[in-house]
Image (cartoon, coloured by chain):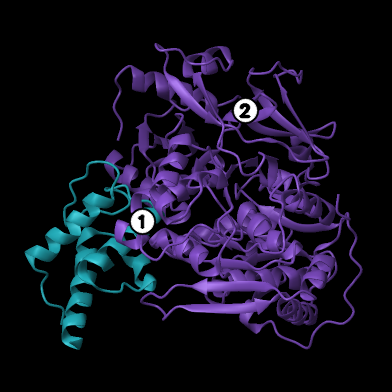
Amino acid sequence: MKIARTLHDALAQAARADAGYWFVAPSNADNAGSHVYRSYADLRERSLRVASALRGAGVRTGDLVALVLPDAEQFLTALFGASFAGATPASLYPPVTVADVPRYVELTGSILRAAAARAVVTTPALATEFESARSSCPDLMFVLSFDALDAPPLHDVPPCSLDAIAFVQFTSGSTSAPKGVALSHRNVAANVDAINGPAGLGTGADDVAVSWLPLNHDMGFVGMALGPLYSTRPGVLLTPQAFVKRPVEWLRAITRYRGTISFAPNFAYDLCVRRVKDRDLDGLDLSSWRIAGCGAEPIHGPTLAAFAEKFAPVGFHSSSFLPCYGLAEHVLAATLPRRGRPTRTNVVSADALTSQRIAVPANGCDRAMTLVACGTALPDHQLRIVDNDGRDVADRHVGEIVLAGPSVMLGYYRQPALTADAIRDGWLHTGDLGYVDGGELFVCGRSKDVIIANGRKYHPQDLEWAVDDLAGARRGRSVAFAVSEAGRPDRVVVVVESSGTSASEALTTAVRRRVGDLFGLYVDEVAIVPSGTVARTTSGKVQRALTRERYQQLVESGFSCD
Amino acid sequence: MPEPASDALVDGVIDVLKNVSRRPIEPALDSDLVADLGFDSLQVLEVIAELEDRFDISIPLNDVPSTRTVAQVVEQVAALVSERSNAR
């Protein structure tokens, strides 16, 4: 096992190597395309300048500094800068669109307030908007534009403990209890070193990481930005927009830089299968790509098979696939399979899996489900599958995945109750369901009510909050949930109690528009229901599970909604 | 002064929208991309890429957020197409 080190030490070590990041912007209408190289030494120098400017602005040791920066280079520089200044950097999602920035700022403001953020570092345009959030965030002293953060490099970097918070990653903006995953330097080093280590990717001197993932996402930041930095190898970073607009840009970057390691959620492989045109295959060479990681959302075997088939003629090896399981609360990775082997699958009966919670091989008459093996726990980490009472279940029996070891987060930032619920006796309760077969984890669902779309987790509370103030909706009576079916993307459902003041059609449109503007998500079904339909507890909180059950009964009985 | 969009251009835009959508849709000029046609933020970028290929134009991403309806897409494409032909 490698000796644990802080973010500061890792960057100092990387700065002595001849490596760094390539920031790639493909050509489009907005610019002619660029490939900007920043050595790790350069990144360190710039971060020390930002650190000095933050200190000069009044940021003090231990302050939470929220980063709302869509640009990868700015984000990394600000994150290291805040860390060198002795502050705690926190990453927040930038707005998905600029269609409803005031509501975005309100949502983000609730995170800043709960986290007692002292400063927010953002773009000049958003800085103006965040000024308006200050009145509701008493701790927020500084709204800073990244462009203005420049001063002679900081020399007296405060000492940094391995057990201090390295950074906080906010995954949810729900108004009541925002979830910011707080990770120590020790956590980060344990996970990144295990991923890069011999039992993981076996990262070596010839490796080049290529990624288009957003950096406010664990796989993008920890996996594809810190991963190469901690192993002093180059990292090539594209923008998520460039990839989504033209998925072939990802594969072109791998070709151009002889990329060897690249991770992405299932949907990215699917986008490549559907959208990379045959004529675009000319000029691609994916033969260098030895680790094609797949995680962050349910993995669909047929997607990987279709990708391997389509790109085999340009050198892709199907044995490069590395389906894995992980979550931000465990830094990034929880399990990895042995590299360089064919993807292992289980074909099981879907009915037995849901009704008896056992994975039995499908026979001819069952509805079959193909599940992908995600490997074993990282070295020095443990994994168990437990029932509702916390008892271990037998192999092939479905239960909650729980994890222990040096990657388990410190906790949710300033949320002791949520933390105590997630980490019990040292075991992180993931809320995900799985079983073990042949020593390997198969993930088959989730017990928490998160909605997963395009590799990102959405918390139903956030969607509910987003639609709460729409005209015609009763306050506090909206429920959002996902209807999941194996092998298909989640269907997003929002149930809204009508106050009777707006036409259902107008309210339906307003719900879709609001959720689209704030989260970039399409609501598959909006159910406008009469007063009193949404189940609530005696204390007035909505009962999501019960509402979902009632909704599904209604749908089965033929009730139609839009 | 933007020229009125030709029928061929309208048909072309509607064809792109139908191809990108993963469900059967019947776009009309006043259809809202998100609320009526069900495009999420990923698919909007996909629509842009397909429109660029079909009409040989470059759509600046800055203009995208203000685009809500099919009519606005048509108008924007028409303006870029006429800009392109004027430049030649």
Alpha-carbon span between mark 1 and mark 2: 33 Å
Mark 2 element type: strand
Q: Is residue A187 left or right of residue A544?
A: right
Letter of the chain shown purple in the rendering: A
Which comes sooner in the sequence, label 1 or label 2?
A: 1
Viewer-side residue, A230 vs A308: A308
Image quadrant assignment for residue A488: top left
Q: Residues within 10 Å of mark 2 (few under 14, many from 20)?
A: many
Q: Is residue A424 left or right of residue B35?
A: right
Q: Which mark is residue A276?
A: 1
Q: Are marks 1 and 2 in contact (CB under 8 Å)?
A: no
Residue A44, placed above or below residue A151 = above
Indicate the quadrant containing the C terminus of chain A: top left, top right, bottom left or bottom right. Answer: top left
Q: Chain of mark 2?
A: A
Mark 1 element type: loop
Residue A536, placed above or below residue A366 = below
- Drawing shade for chain B: cyan
Viewer-side residue, A510 vs A299: A299
Residue denoted by label 2 = A433
Q: Position of residue A143 (x, y in %)?
A: 66, 73
Q: Position of residue A184 (x, y in %)?
A: 82, 53
Q: Position of residue A507 (x, y in %)?
A: 34, 44
